[in-house]
Image (cartoon, rainbow, N blue to C red):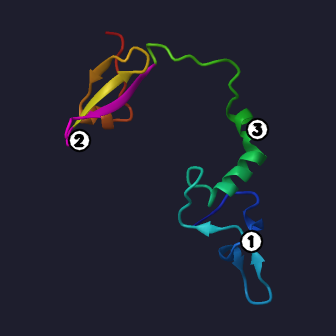
Amino acid sequence: MKYCQGPDCHTYKTQDRLKGPKGNKTYQTRRRSSMYYGSGNFCSMNCYNDWAETFIDKAVDHFGRTTEPKHLTEDNAWRKSFDWDSSYSNRTYVMRNGITKETRPLTEAQYDDNNYTLNTGE
């Protein structure tokens, strides 16, 4: 079980947040086995947005603020993709260049391998 990371989660008045014995109840931060928002850290979009409003500038500064534009070039525009045949029963795996639209075939194992990169130095 883990707690929602929303800084104001305990202030939302819902029945599942109301805890404690009769006469001594308090609203508490939600505790769940799984959360569905913000990579599993927040119980709702409200809590996710509360966190972002409070901490997003600190987080961006900590991990690195973008200070100049990034560029998508022919060399770094390769992305894994797949196409279906006309009956939608078989997939064809490819690397597709987002700029040139060129495709190169992949095996299913290469597609599934998160460390596989296309050798563009051919």
Q: In this view, does 5 lie to the left or right of 109?
A: right
User: At numbered mark 2, what does the secondary structure look like: helix, strand or loop?
Assistant: loop
Q: Give the amino acid type for the residue marked by disc 2 in the picture.
A: Tyr
The residue range painted magenta reads 77-90
- Number of other residues with Cα within 10 Å of mark 2, as a class: few under 14, some 14 to 19, many 20 or more: few
Question: Can you name the residue that lies furthest to the top here?
Answer: 122
Q: Is residue 24 magenta?
A: no
Mark nearer the N terminus (3 vs 1): 1
Residue 88: assigned label? 2
Query: Marks 1 and 2, Cα distance to the nearest angstrom?
Result: 47 Å
Q: Mark 3 points at which residue?
A: 57
Residue 13 — which label? 1
- Identify the secondary structure beneath mark 1: loop
Position of residue 6 relative to residue 67, above or below, is: below
The kind of residue on which mark 1 rests is: Lys
Amino acid type assigned to the residue bearing label 3 in the image: Asp
